[in-house]
Amino acid sequence: MRKIAEKIKKLRAIVDIETITRLKSTFIYIFSNRFLEGQENLMSLIKIIVYTLAFLLSVLYLGRFFF
């Protein structure tokens, strides 16, 4: 009985380690994807700001000649 209990404990430890490893890899995968999406969103926001500033500067520059 004691040997069976020890084997069950070892198997539980192996299953726990495997479960934790899978959870870690899943969390890292989800986190890395969200981080990359966040970077893409940030780049889109920066592009919008840069294009808006370029448009405003061009309007101001052209406005010098008309007004």
Image (tube, rainbow, N blue to C red):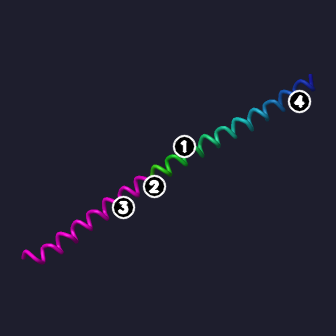
Location of residue 52 in the rendering, given as x and y in whole percent from the top left corner: 26, 63
Q: Which residue is mark 4?
A: 6
- Mark 2 vs 4: CB contact within 8 A: no
Q: Position of residue 53 (x, y in %)?
A: 27, 67
Q: Are marks 2 and 3 in contact (CB under 8 Å)?
A: no
Q: Could you give the CA–CA distance between mark 1 and mark 2, rounded to whole angstroms?
A: 14 Å
The x, y position of residue 27, in whole percent, is 59, 43
Image-quadrant location for residue 48? bottom left
Magenta segment boundaries in residue numbering: 39-67
Q: Which amino acid type corresponds to the residue marked 3 in the rendered image?
A: Ile
Look at the numbered disc 2 and give the secondary structure of its residue: helix
Residue wearing tag 1: 30
Q: CA distance from mark 1 to mark 3?
A: 24 Å
Front one among 28 and 11: 28
Nearer to the camera, 26 or 3? 26
Residue 9 horizontal/vertical position (percent): 83, 31
Foreground tag (1 vs 3): 3
Per the model, the C-alpha gap separating discs 2 and 3 is: 10 Å
Q: Which residue is mark 2?
A: 39
Compared across the picture, whether 49 is left or right of 6 comes to left
Q: Residue at x 22, y 71 (%)?
A: 57
Q: Main secondary structure of the magenta part?
A: helix
Q: Earlier in the sequence, mark 2 or mark 3?
A: 2
Assess whether residue 65 is covered by the magenta stretch.
yes
